[in-house]
Amino acid sequence: MTVKMLGNVFFRRIAYQESSQTFGVISMRMDLQDSNGLNPTRPSASTHAAMTSSSSSGKVTMGTSTMGEHSTGDEVEVHSLLIIDQHTFEGIYSSTGGCELYW
């Protein structure tokens, strides 16, 4: 099940780790491609966590065409893993990136 919350952010999965008293949340948002790369369309937890890391989208080859390259103005799905404190709901860590798959 996917739950849409906070504008353009979709929460996909949530897990709780008792030993660290944190939640892990997998989310997806839409960013816009411009001449400088991907830019979030609005603030989100994955862009405001205390610590962040990211990787660029990979290119996937299906048959003879290569997908994953974007033009200026394209909307691009960005996936994130968020680590959230159980007591304060502060974003402790966010890892953003991944690979898009086209069929």
Image (tube, rainbow, N blue to C red):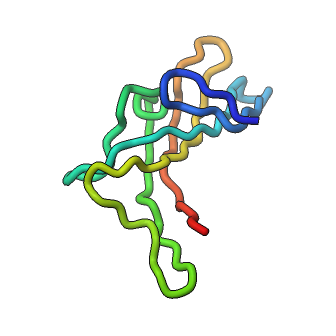
Residue at coordinates 50% horizontally, 87% vertically from top-left?
A: 64
Q: Give left or right: position of 89 versus 12.
A: left
Vertical relation: 47 (above or below) 99: above
Q: Position of residue 47 (x, y in %)?
A: 41, 33
Hey, which residue is sitting farthest top in the picture? 88
Name the one closer to the observer, 68 or 90. 68
Vertical relation: 22 (above or below) 64: above
Residue at coordinates 67% horizontally, 34% vertically from top-left?
A: 24
Q: How many marks?
A: 0
Hey, which residue is sitting farthest bottom in the picture? 64
Vertical relation: 99 (above or below) 41: below
Snapshot quadrant of residue 26? top right
Q: Position of residue 39 (x, y in %)?
A: 31, 42
Snapshot quadrant of residue 70? bottom left
Q: Give left or right: position of 96 versus 81.
A: left
Snapshot quadrant of residue 10? top right
Q: Position of residue 86 (x, y in %)?
A: 67, 18
Quadrant placement of the C terminus: bottom right
Hey, which residue is sitting farthest left in the picture? 35
Residue at coordinates 48% horizontally, 52% vertically from top-left?
A: 97
Vertical relation: 100 (above or below) 15: below
Quadrant placement of the N terminus: top right
Residue at coordinates 47% horizontally, 66% vertically from top-left?
A: 58
